Amino acid sequence: MDGFFKTLVEALNGGRPTLTAKQFLGKEEGPSYFKPEAFVQFAKSLRPKEISELQEVFTGMAEGLRIGGSIAARTDRGGRKYAFVTVNRTNANTGGKYILEGGTIPFLKDYVDGKFVIDFTLEQLVEEAMNG
C-alpha cells in the first residue's frame, strides 16, 4: 500500500494502523504474534465449537467491533487456558471461547488497547499460514 492510501486508511480507522495476516504471522514487517507453522498447529488443536467461536471473535475484530466485558482467564476441562470474549454488535452481543495460548494473548491485548485494526478473518489467517 503506498503512502497516500496507507495514511487514508489509518485516518478512516481513527489513526490506528491495519494489521495484516502476513504481519500477524511474521511474514511482513510489523507486529507478529505467531510463526505460520505454530499457528497451523494451534488451529489444528481446536475443536469444532472452538473454531466456530474463534471465527466469530475474529470476524467481529475484522469489522472493527468493540470487545466488551472483562476478559478473565479460565481453564477448561482439557486444561487449556481461555477467556470468554464478547463482541459488541448493534442489536446483540456475540463472541465465544478464545483460547489463550502463544500469540493469542498479546494479540487480544493489543486489539483491545486499540493498537491496530485487522483486515482478515480466522479463515483467511489459516489460509495464509498454510500457504507459507
Image (cartoon, rainbow, N blue to C red):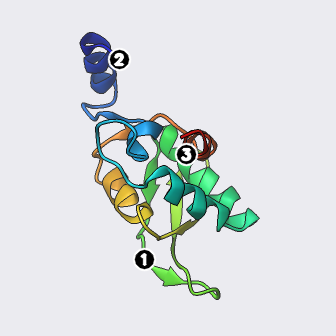
Residue 89 seen in render: no
Is residue 87 something one can see in this rendering?
A: yes
Disc 3 to disc 2, C-alpha distance: 21 Å
Residue at disc 1, secondary structure: loop
Amino acid type, callout 2 = Met
* Residue 46, quarter of the rendered image: bottom right
Residue beneath disc 2: 1
- Residue placed furthest toward the right: 48
67 sits to left or right of 4 = right
Q: Nearer the viewer, mark 1 or mark 3?
A: 3
Which residue appears at 64% of the width and 68% of the height? 45
123 relative to 39, above or below: above
Amino acid type, label 1? Ala
Residue matched to label 3: 129
Q: Residues within 10 Å of mark 3 (few under 14, many from 20)?
A: many
Question: Which one is closest to the eye, mark 1 or mark 2?
Answer: 2
Residue drawn where x is 35% and y is 36% of the image? 28
Residue appearing at x 75%, y 63% in the figure: 48
Secondary structure at numbered mark 2 = loop
Q: Are marks 1 and 3 in contact (CB under 8 Å)?
A: no
- Return the residue nearer the eye: 129 or 67: 129
Q: Earlier in the sequence, mark 3 or mark 2?
A: 2
Indicate the position of residue 31 as horizontal and vertical percent values: 30, 46
Residues under labels 1 and 3: Cα distance? 28 Å
**Earlier-in-chain disc, 1 versus 2:** 2
Residue 35 position in % (x across, y down): 44, 53
Residue at which label 1 appears: 72
Q: Amino acid at mark 3?
A: Ala
